[in-house]
Image: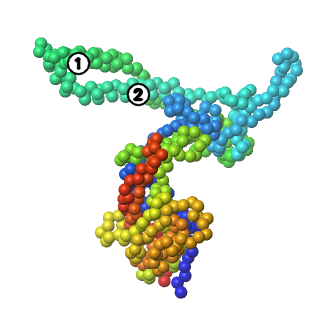
Amino acid sequence: MESVQRVGAAGMLENHRVLFKCKDYRLPLCELYFCRHCLKIRSKDCVSHEVDSHYCPNCMENMPSAEAKLKKNRCANCFDCPSCKHTLSTRATSVLVPSADDPNKAVAKKAYYLACAFCRWTSRDIGLKDQSVASGGWEEQENPNGKRISELVEYYKQVAQKEKADRERKKYAKSRIRLLGMSGKYASQSARRHASLTSMQNLSLKEEEQKLVRISGSEPVEEVEGLPEDIYTTPINLAHKGSAQPSTGTVTSIAQRLSQPDEQPATTTSLHPIHKHLLVKRSLRCKECEHNLSKPEFNPASIKFKIQLVALHYVPEIRILSLPNLYYQKESVVLLSLINPLEETTTVTLLPCEEDDAEDTESTAKIVLPTQELILSARDDAAEYDEGDSVTDFKDDPEVVIFRKANKISFVVKVTPMKAVGDVKVACKIKYNYKNISTPLGSKEEKESPSVWLEHHVDINLGPVLPS
C-alpha cells in the first residue's frame, strides 16, 4: 500500500514550492503584484519604485525629502550604538554641582547620557559630556576632511551644470546656425529676436565658465610618516566588541570602523554615537500603464496601505495538500488544493505544457491533470464558520474533487518522476476567468467590466525522489 505524507500547516505555507512565472522570474504568489489595468502579474523588477516619505524608525518623525538630503538621510535626535548597532537610549542620573548662591555648597542636578541596553556601552566611556536636557545637543565629531570634501562636491556640481549646458547648446546648434544666417536684411522679426537671445546665451555661458570655482589639485607626497617603533611589540587587545567595559586600547572590528568612514577609529575609546539612518515609505507603479500597485499611508506609525494589489488577492492560489512517496518512473497520486480569493465564482482550468513550450524548462516529471473545469465558490469570510454543506450545489467528479468547503477545493493529480535523482518538479498552466469590478470616484455604484480569461505558468516542486 502506498504511504501518503500529510503536509502540515507549516508545509502548506511553504511558498517556495509553488512558483508563478513573471517574465524571467519564478516567484511565490505572495511576492507578486497584479495590475488590474494590464491584467498581468508583476514582480518587483516589473514595477518602478517611488519614494513617498522619509521617517526615523525610532522616533517616527516624518521628514521632507529636501531636509533628509540636507541631513544626509539621518535623524538628528536618535543614535545607534557604535559597538553593537542597537538603538541608544537616554539615561538620567544625578550629579553634584556647586550651587550658584554658595560655591562651597553642592546641590544635586539631573544629567543625561546615552547608554546601550544590549552591550552596556555608554557615552561616558569615551568622555562625552553629559547634557542638562534630555533632548540632546550632544557634541558632534568633526570630520577632519570635511572642508576638502565640501569643496570637491561644490566644484563637481558646477562641472555637472556646465556639461548639461554644453549638451543643450549642441542640441540646438543646427537651428541656431540657420537662424544666425537669416539675421540679415530679409530675416523675419522672430528670427532676429531668437538670434539676439542666442548671442546673449553665449555670453552667459562664457560668464559661467569664468565664475567656475577653481580648486587646488591633490599633491602627491613622496615621503610618508613611518610606523611607530613599538607597533610590532605592543600587545593587541582583541576583546569582544560587545563587552560591558571595554579596556583601553581595544581594537575595533571592521564593521565598527566602516560604520564611521570619516574617522575609521582604530580603538573602541574613539567610537562615537552614530545618527540613526532614515527609512522610506515607497510606492510601486506598473511600468507599462503607470498605475499604482502599492501605495502606503503617509503616517510612519501606520502599517496600512491605500493601495495594495498583491497577486494573492486576485489569482487563484495552488497549495500542496498531501504528498505520497515518489519513486522513479512510478505513478503517484498527489493531492492539491485551490483557493479562490475573489468575491465572484471563478472557473479554473489546468492545462498541461506543450513539448516545445519555452517556459517549461525545469520539469522533471510527467503530470496528469483534471480534464474538467474546476468551479470555485466566491470568497465569503462568514462561510468559514458555516456548518452547512454546499457540495450539492456543484456537480463534481468524486474521483477528481476530493473535498470542497467555501471557496476551497482539493483535487487529485497523477505524477510520474522521470529522473532518478533530484527534486520532482512539474509545470502546468492555470487558466481562470476574471471580472474587474471597480468603483469610480464620487460614485456609489460599482462598474462591472466583461469577464476575461487569464493564463499563468506555474511550477510546482513536490520534493525529492526516493530510492526504489
In the structure shown, which secondary structural element does the residue marked by tag 2 occupy? helix
What's the residue at 42%, 25% (across, down)?
Answer: 155
The correct choice, above or below, for 112 with respect to 440 in the image is above
- Residue 172 visible in the displayed image: yes
The local crowd at label 1, few if under 14, some if 14 to 19, many if 20 or more residues have their Cα within 10 Å, is some
The local crowd at label 2, few if under 14, some if 14 to 19, many if 20 or more residues have their Cα within 10 Å, is few
Asked whether, in this view, residue 173 is left or right of residue 37, the answer is left
Asked whether, in this view, residue 135 is left or right of residue 13, the answer is right
The amino acid beneath tag 1 is His
x and y percentages locating residue 359 in the rendered image: 35, 64
Q: Marks 1 and 2, Cα distance to the nearest angstrom?
A: 31 Å
The amino acid beneath tag 2 is Tyr
Residue under circle 1?
A: 194
Pick the front one: 56 or 447? 447
What's the residue at 81%, 31% (across, down)?
Answer: 94
Residue under circle 2?
A: 156
What's the residue at 52%, 84% (across, down)?
Answer: 2
x and y percentages locating residue 303 in the rendered image: 58, 46
Tell me if label 1 and label 2 are in contact, CB under 8 Å.
no
Asked whether, in this view, residue 340 is left or right of residue 212, the answer is right
The correct choice, above or below, for 64 with respect to 105 in the image is below
Pick the front one: 80 or 426? 426
In the structure shown, which secondary structural element does the residue marked by tag 1 occupy? helix
Pick the front one: 149 or 68? 68
x and y percentages locating residue 97 in the rendered image: 82, 24
Mark closer to the chain start, 1 or 2: 2
x and y percentages locating residue 284 in the rendered image: 45, 45
Q: Nearer the viewer, mark 1 or mark 2?
A: 1
Residue located farthest toward the front when viewing the structure as drawn: 445
Residue located farthest toward the top when viewing the structure as drawn: 185
